[in-house]
Image (cartoon, rainbow, N blue to C red):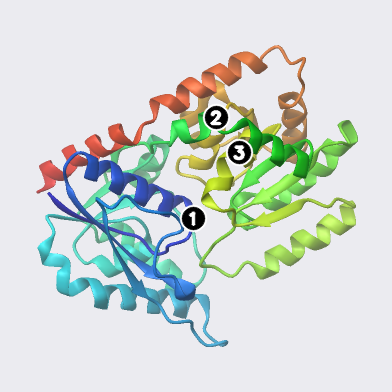
């Protein structure tokens, strides 16, 4: 089959990671796959090397003016990707969009709903609504999101969980892990940057409480590439860090090869997101054998079960992180084994075969 997968960015966000991994897994089953996306900030390719079996089409996206709003940038993103893709759309058996921007650009398409947002910016709210109701078929990466889509919009979606690059995180180089520990000491890691959906302020509060229990622990924040403007939230986070007298290490985006040892060297992985569809970064931490503490959300209960610890607020998050890093904790070994087994079951090959079955039915 000729398949087009559309995304909105070349940067290492969860939906982009998903798109590339799915494209490569589909190509390994013999499909003819092309990934279309926007090249922001002068990007001509993705954040990592893509299997040559997958074609990539990166559409240049010029920077906007200083006065351009987020809403205006979203609309211009849709128009730019649509103008480039539309002349080629009829050449594909399946067009599959991975976000609201690419769904707006794709025309008739399948849509993966990774999670459901609630925007207040009018352009974003309209984009989000159209990208839910206009596609002719839907995929969700968890049953919880599929149930939310059915309850809110009456839309039935196929549930196809994410895969995880298990071997990449489970077999990291010991020397590389040792370098991360030498650099950062004993640390709690979170991946996803500093933004409202990631629960960054709650994690900051929890970290201040955790230091009362174990002053040697550091908090390391990785990632953070985003289309949206979170400068005000980041400023609040920095002011609160000063008020709490804590100094987390903020790395920003991490090179692809550096991420697995950074994850594997952590004492625990914190994932206090307020909204998620699956939690791919957290599943990667389980593959690395790292204790996991997540927000107590139905979707994360569904995905992680007994392999994670759950916390509903900063105080609980601090308690669960303290337990997760305690070498005397009796549940530590069992959770670690359960986490590795869970991550190993989530393969991209299985995800690709499920997508292919859906595509063949739709085609």
Contact (Cβ within 8 Å) of mark 2 with mark 1: no
Instruction: Classify 194 as above or below 358.
Output: below
- Horizontal side of 229 relative to 183 (left or right) equals left
Q: Residues within 10 Å of mark 1 (few under 14, many from 20)?
A: many
Q: Which residue is mark 2?
A: 286
Q: CA distance from mark 2 to mark 1?
A: 19 Å
Tag of residue 261: 3
Contact (Cβ within 8 Å) of mark 3 with mark 1: no
Q: Which residue is mark 1?
A: 12
Q: Is 106 in front, or is 28?
A: 28
Contact (Cβ within 8 Å) of mark 2 with mark 3: no
The residue at the point 42 percent across, 52 percent down is 15
Asked if residue 152 can be seen in this view, the reply is no
The quadrant in which residue 311 appears is top right
- Horizontal side of 93 relative to 158 (left or right) equals left
Find numbered disc 1 in the image and state the secondary structure of the residue it sits on.
loop
Q: Is 171 in front, or is 110?
A: 171
Relative image position of residue 313 (x, y in whole percent): 71, 39
Q: Is 39 in front, or is 79?
A: 39
Find numbered disc 3 in the image and state the secondary structure of the residue it sits on.
helix
- Horizontal side of 292 relative to 84 (left or right) equals right
Count the marks: how many? 3
Instruction: Classify 311 as above or below 201.
Output: above
The residue at the point 68 percent across, 55 percent down is 251
The mark closer to the camera, 2 or 3, is 3
The residue at the point 60 percent across, 34 percent down is 296
Asked if residue 46 can be seen in this view, the reply is yes
Mark 3 / mark 1, whichever is N-terminal: 1
Relative image position of residue 150 (x, y in whole percent): 33, 44
């Amino acid at each position: 089959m000729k398949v087009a997968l559309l995304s909105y960015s070349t940067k290492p966000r969860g939906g982009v990671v998903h798109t590339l991994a799915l494209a490569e897994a589909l190509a390994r089953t013999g499909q003819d796959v092309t990934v279309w996306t926007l090249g922001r900030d002068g990007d001509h390719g993705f954040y990592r090397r893509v299997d040559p079996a997958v074609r990539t089409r990166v559409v240049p996206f010029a920077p906007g003016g200083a006065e351009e709003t987020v809403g205006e940038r979203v609309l211009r993103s849709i128009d730019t990707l649509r103008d480039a893709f539309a002349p080629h759309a009829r050449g594909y058996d399946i067009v599959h969009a991975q976000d609201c921007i690419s769904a707006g650009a794709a025309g008739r398409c399948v849509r993966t709903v990774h999670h459901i947002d609630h925007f207040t910016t009018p352009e974003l709210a309209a984009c989000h609504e159209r990208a839910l109701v206009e596609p002719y078929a839907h995929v969700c990466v968890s049953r919880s999101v599929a149930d939310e889509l059915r309850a809110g919009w009456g839309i039935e979606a196929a549930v196809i969980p994410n895969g995880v690059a298990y071997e990449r995180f489970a077999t990291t180089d010991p020397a590389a892990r040792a370098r991360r520990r030498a650099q950062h000491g004993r640390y709690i890691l979170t991946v996803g940057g500093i933004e409202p959906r990631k629960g960054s302020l709650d994690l900051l509060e929890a970290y201040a409480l955790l230091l009362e229990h174990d002053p040697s622990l550091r908090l390391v924040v990785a990632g953070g590439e985003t289309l949206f403007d979170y400068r005000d939230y980041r400023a609040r986070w920095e002011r609160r860090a000063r008020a709490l007298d804590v100094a987390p290490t903020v790395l920003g985006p991490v090179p692809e090869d550096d991420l697995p040892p950074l994850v594997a060297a952590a004492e625990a992985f914190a994932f206090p997101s307020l909204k998620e569809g699956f939690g791919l970064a957290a599943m990667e931490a389980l593959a690395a054998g790292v204790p996991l503490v997540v927000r107590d959300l139905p979707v994360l209960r569904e995905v992680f079960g007994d392999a994670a610890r759950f916390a509903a607020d900063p105080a609980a998050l601090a308690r669960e992180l303290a337990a997760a890093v305690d070498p005397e904790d009796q549940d530590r070994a069992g959770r670690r084994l359960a986490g590795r087994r869970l991550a190993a079951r989530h393969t991209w090959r299985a995800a690709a075969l499920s997508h292919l079955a859906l595509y063949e039915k739709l085609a």
